[in-house]
Image (spheres, rainbow, N blue to C red):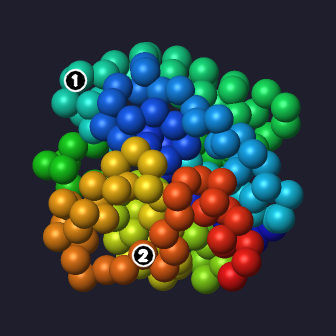
Amino acid sequence: MNKALFWDLQGTLGGEAVASLETFEPYPFSKEALTLSKNHGFRNIVITNQSKIGKGLLSKETYDKEASRILDYFNSDGVLLDEFLCCPHTSEDNCNCKKPKTGLMELCREKYDLDIKKCFVIGDMGKNEIVMAHNAGCMGVLVLTGGGRKSLGEFRHTWAEHEADIIAENALEAVKMILRK
């Protein structure tokens, strides 16, 4: 298993794009999307920016509790999520793990010996996920859930130099389109 889908969390697998993690509820099709990708040999890895931690608006304890709740849901019938990684930093911290930087992808690439050319980044924010995919050298998939429609419309200028390789209605459609490639 040397390929992975790098998933955004909020707005992609559930919840609102910029809402609190405490209000995250999975979309009804998300488990099916993760199962389908897993059944076709992909690792499922969540990478989420949680700058509210760095800003003091979300405690590490609350984050850990919510991350555990989300993992318990997705992994309740077997491991669908191989990793659940978070960048807690603000933009001012200038870390290498905040999307669209690729630090967390690199950790996973090394840990799982991933062939980055067989990997995809899926998310609802072009300025984060599509740019991160291109920075890493893999394919970027924009979903229209969460902030996806606005990302493609009024916020398109924030990632104008890049194009999504796939645009899908939601996470499940994204996986189906990836499998047809």
Mark 2 residue type: Ala
**Res. 56 mark:** 1
Q: Would you call the spot at circle 1 few (<14 residues within 10 Å), some (14-19), or many (20 or more)?
A: few
Q: Is residue 92 visible?
A: yes
Q: Residue furthest left?
A: 92
Label 2: how many residues lie within 10 Å, few (<14), some (14-19) or many (20+)? Answer: many
Residue 2 % position (x, y):
75, 71
Tell me which residue sits at (71%, 40%) in the image. Answer: 31
Q: Earlier in the sequence, mark 1 or mark 2?
A: 1
Residue 68: quadrant of the picture: top right
Q: Secondary structure at mark 1?
A: loop
Residue depth check, mark 1 versus mark 2: number of the one nearer the observer: 2
Question: Is residue 151 toward the left or the right of residue 146 in the image?
Answer: left
Query: Percent x, y for residue 85?
Result: 51, 44
Q: Which residue is mark 2?
A: 164
Question: In the rendering, at what x and y percent does residue 6 appear?
Answer: 56, 59
Residue lying at 52% horizontally and 18% vertically, measured from the top left: 65
Residue at the (66%, 71%) spot, across then down: 177
Instruction: Give how far across and how far down residue 126 sits, in percent.
Output: 34, 64
- Given the image, on which type of amino acid does mark 1 rest? Gly
In the rendered structure, the answer to whether residue 41 lies left or right of residue 67 reads right
Query: For residue 100, what is the image quadrant?
Result: bottom left
Residue, x 27% and y 31% (percent of image)? 52
